[in-house]
Image (cartoon, rainbow, N blue to C red):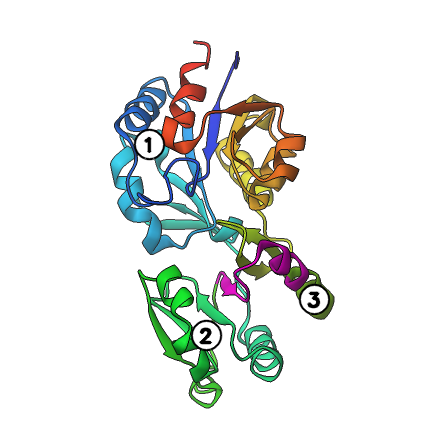
């Protein structure tokens, strides 16, 4: 089904990993991905997650140099994980972070947010701590009260991504994006994960733009590439590769532009796609 493939871009959440096992890659997927590397086909994780969330997963699938490169924070950073060399990055400046946080404190103090690679979620309001649903949602992280006065001491701080949960409703989350896009044109804003997690990166940052940089760096043809994903942060990738593949339970908008579909993460949809690559 898939011919002359040079590279495959693979999303993580609900694509390579499931919601319940978000740090574990199934045996079928691991075997198929390592088989790709033996065939000298580049295997690139392309995710909205931050670096610390990826290392454990990368270690499960890494075999040789053909899986060295990882795109993370929705394309803000491309790194050679094996050599720990960053070949591309675009971060949000301290001044833009500060403008956004002041807006958040004044208009939405109950929202929770997290910087890339932070071990904590933050909120400006103590009321947030009483909302048990939030604590269940972020059970891997500690929730802390945020102080702008303290933050102002770190003038050199930058981040590749800010993650936000402003509502537990998918419909409401879309309205939040409209609001933020109007207020902050300097950010690229997408819904990721399970339809309620909103991610802000620097303007122009997408998985697709990062893939173009990596294609130039490694000299492969994006027309001979597969992208597998499930969320709107995969849309930019789907628009530039020759073979965009959506998971069966993907976002409806993504399904419309996908040329192919595969099984869900629980049913090893990634392994099925790889198995259909012609030698």
Per the image, the residue denoted by label 1 is 65
Residue 170 location, quadrant: bottom right
> In the image, which residues are magenta?
160-176
In the drawing, what numbered circle is on residue 157?
2
Q: If the image is split into quadrants, where does the C terminus sit? A: top left
Q: Which residue does the image show at 40% across and 77% down from the upper left?
A: 130
Q: How crowded is mark 3: few (under 14 residues within 10 Å), some or many (20 or more)?
A: few
Query: CB of mark 2 within 8 Å of CB of mark 3?
Result: no
In the drawing, what numbered circle is on residue 125?
none
Residue 84 on image: x %, y %: 32, 49
Q: Is residue 215 magenta?
A: no
Q: Is mark 1 on a helix, strand or loop?
A: helix
Q: Taking the image as drawn, is residue 86 in sight? A: yes
For residue 124, above or below residue 13: below
Q: What element carries label 3?
A: helix
Q: How far apart are marks 1 and 2 (CA)?
A: 32 Å
Q: How far apart are marks 1 and 3 (CA)?
A: 43 Å
Q: Residues within 10 Å of mark 2 (few under 14, many from 20)?
A: some
Q: Which residue does the image show at 55% across and 70% down from the upper left?
A: 93
**Image depth: mark 2 or mark 3 in front:** 3
Per the image, the residue denoted by label 3 is 179
């Amino acid at each position: 089904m898939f011919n002359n493939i040079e590279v495959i871009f693979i999303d993580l959440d609900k694509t390579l990993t499931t919601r319940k096992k978000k740090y574990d890659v199934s045996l079928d997927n691991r075997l198929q991905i390592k088989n790709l590397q033996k065939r000298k086909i580049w295997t690139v994780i392309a995710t909205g997650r931050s670096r610390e969330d990826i290392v454990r997963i990368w270690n499960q699938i890494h075999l040789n140099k053909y899986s060295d490169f990882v795109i993370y924070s929705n394309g803000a950073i491309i790194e050679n994980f094996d050599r720990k060399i960053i070949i591309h990055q675009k971060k949000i400046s301290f001044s833009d972070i500060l403008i956004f946080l002041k807006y958040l404190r004044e208009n939405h103090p109950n929202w929770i947010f997290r910087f890339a690679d932070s071990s904590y979620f933050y909120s400006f309001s103590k009321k947030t701590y009483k909302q048990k649903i939030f604590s269940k949602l972020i059970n891997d992280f500690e929730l802390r009260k945020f102080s702008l006065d303290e933050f102002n001491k770190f003038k050199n701080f930058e981040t590749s991504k800010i993650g936000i949960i402003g509502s537990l409703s998918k419909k409401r989350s879309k309205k939040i994006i409209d609001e933020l896009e109007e207020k902050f044109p300097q950010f690229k804003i997408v819904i990721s994960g399970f339809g309620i997690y909103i991610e802000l990166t620097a303007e122009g940052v997408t998985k697709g733009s990062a893939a173009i940089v990596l294609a130039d760096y490694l000299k492969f043809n994006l027309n001979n590439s597969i992208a597998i994903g499930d969320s709107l942060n995969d849309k930019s990738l789907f628009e530039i590769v020759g073979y965009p593949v959506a998971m069966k339970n993907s976002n409806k908008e993504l399904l419309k532009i996908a040329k192919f579909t595969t099984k869900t993460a629980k049913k090893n949809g990634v392994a099925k796609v790889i198995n259909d690559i012609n030698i």
